[in-house]
């Protein structure tokens, strides 16, 4: 038992309580009142009645029954009746504080009935003693029930607080994951678009330089280099905006200005500078910022993919952004070699995520004849995220 109590603080405390109650019972039996002092059997029954209390938390009902079984013959022998009361009350309190209301009432009624019956048989004239024991027992049962309800109330408060804290932590993790995904999409859209155009423009400059070195078209080379410089400046500006947002810890919700449909003309001009023939048509008014940003990024990624995978010098790209009754319709088609053989990347994934963020639908794939087509329908009401 010594090793067990060392591992279980509750059991060790209850063992100490049992020792204290045994001492209190012995003092009551020996020095308080003028009742009959226990003999050897009485002392054995009295002290043994405190031993089961060591396990009162594990088996409260069994402990109470054992205490009653030892106390009943003690009372029947008419020894000092107040001595075993502390151990009995502790056993009753444990049943009330650890069990249900039904169990407490049932066990309390049985114990009280047995105690009153035993007292009536062994001490018929002790009405005052009987009433006193009955009152103590009822008070202990009520106290145990109150403590049990209070503990349950405190536990429910703690559980709600822990659940709220877990909810806050999960919400924070979700927001962090969404923000990381948004940043990844923005950086992909920015860098993939800019790097693709720089690569195409560099190829144009290299082709001009290598085509006929003796009759170098300096104007064409200068234009290609100017286009590269312009693309770099634009990319640097967007990248600076993104980094400023990431560094602004005091206003984490600030994401910078969202791109909108007014920037589609610049996208078309940039693609034209890369050698594509872009036919742009925009008919929309009063588009929500999140929807406009999603449409801008879809067109940007579609143009980037068309220029990268078009595979022909006379590439034609048709861009249509029209507002209809069911939402904003975005369509980007090209007559290039298509993208079916290209290694899958994050572009289409990012487009689908952006479309889902505003509650829309997207379809992308090779055309029946030639080229590639991206179509999306973005509802103009009820967007779920105000992100870019």
Image (cartoon, grey):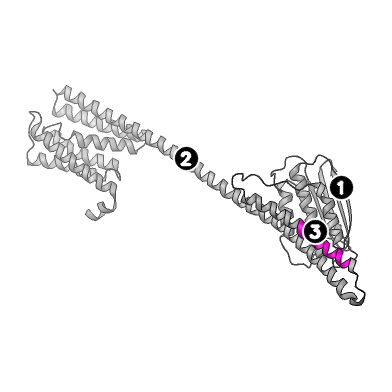
Question: Disc 3 versus disc 2: distance between alpha carbons?
Answer: 55 Å
| Magenta segment includes 287 | no
- Answer whether labels 1 and 2 touch (C-beta < 8 Å): no
**For residue 165, side relative to residue 311 (left or right):** left
Residue 225 placement (x, y as % from top left)? 82, 65
Disc 2 target residue:
161
Pointer 1 or 2: first along the chain: 2
Disc 3 target residue:
230
Mark 1 vs mark 2: in front = 1
**For residue 80, side relative to residue 157 (left or right):** left
Tell me, yes or no, if residue 193 can be seen here.
no
Q: Is residue 41 or residue 303 the one in the foreground?
A: 303
Q: Give me the residue at 10% from left, 40% from top.
A: 43
Q: Which residues are magenta?
A: 220-233
Residue 281 placement (x, y as % from top left)? 88, 49
Mark 3 vs mark 2: in front = 3
Q: Secondary structure at mark 3?
A: helix
Q: How many marks?
A: 3
Disc 1 target residue:
282
């Amino acid at each position: 038992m010594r090793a067990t109590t060392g591992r279980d603080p509750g059991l060790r405390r209850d063992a100490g309580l049992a020792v204290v109650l045994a001492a209190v019972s012995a003092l009551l039996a020996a020095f308080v009142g003028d009742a009959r002092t226990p003999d050897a059997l009485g002392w054995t029954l009295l002290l043994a009645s405190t031993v089961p209390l060591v396990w009162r938390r594990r088996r409260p009902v069994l402990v109470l029954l054992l205490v009653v079984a030892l106390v009943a013959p003690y009372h029947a022998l008419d020894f000092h009746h107040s001595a075993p009361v502390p151990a009995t009350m502790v056993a009753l309190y444990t049943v009330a504080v650890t069990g249900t209301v039904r169990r407490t009432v049932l066990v309390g009624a049985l114990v009280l009935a047995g105690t009153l019956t035993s007292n009536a048989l062994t001490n018929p004239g002790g009405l005052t003693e009987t009433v006193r024991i009955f009152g103590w027992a009822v008070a202990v049962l009520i106290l145990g029930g109150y403590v049990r309800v209070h503990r349950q109330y405190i536990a429910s408060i703690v559980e709600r607080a822990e659940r709220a804290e877990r909810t806050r932590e999960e919400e924070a993790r979700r927001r962090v994951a969404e923000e990381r995904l948004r940043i990844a999409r923005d950086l992909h859209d920015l860098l993939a678009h800019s790097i693709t155009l720089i690569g195409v423009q560099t190829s144009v400059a290299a082709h001009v330089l290598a085509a006929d070195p003796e009759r170098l078209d300096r104007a064409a080379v200068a234009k290609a280099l100017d286009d590269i410089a312009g693309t770099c400046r634009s990319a640097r500006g967007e990248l600076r905006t993104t980094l400023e947002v990431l560094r602004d810890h005091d206003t984490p919700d600030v994401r910078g200005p969202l791109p909108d449909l007014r920037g589609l003309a610049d996208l078309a001009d940039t693609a034209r500078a890369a050698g594509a023939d872009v036919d742009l048509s925009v008919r929309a008014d009063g588009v929500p910022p999140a929807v406009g940003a999603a449409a801008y990024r879809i067109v940007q990624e579609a143009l980037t993919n068309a220029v990268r995978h078009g595979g022909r010098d006379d590439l034609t790209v048709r861009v249509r952004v029209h507002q209809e009754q069911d939402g904003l319709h975005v369509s980007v088609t090209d007559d290039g070699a298509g993208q079916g053989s290209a290694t899958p990347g994050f572009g289409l994934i990012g487009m689908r995520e952006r479309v889902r963020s505003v509650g829309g639908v997207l379809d992308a794939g090779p055309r029946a004849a030639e080229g590639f087509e991206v179509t999306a329908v973005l509802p103009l009401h009820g967007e779920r995220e105000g992100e870019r």
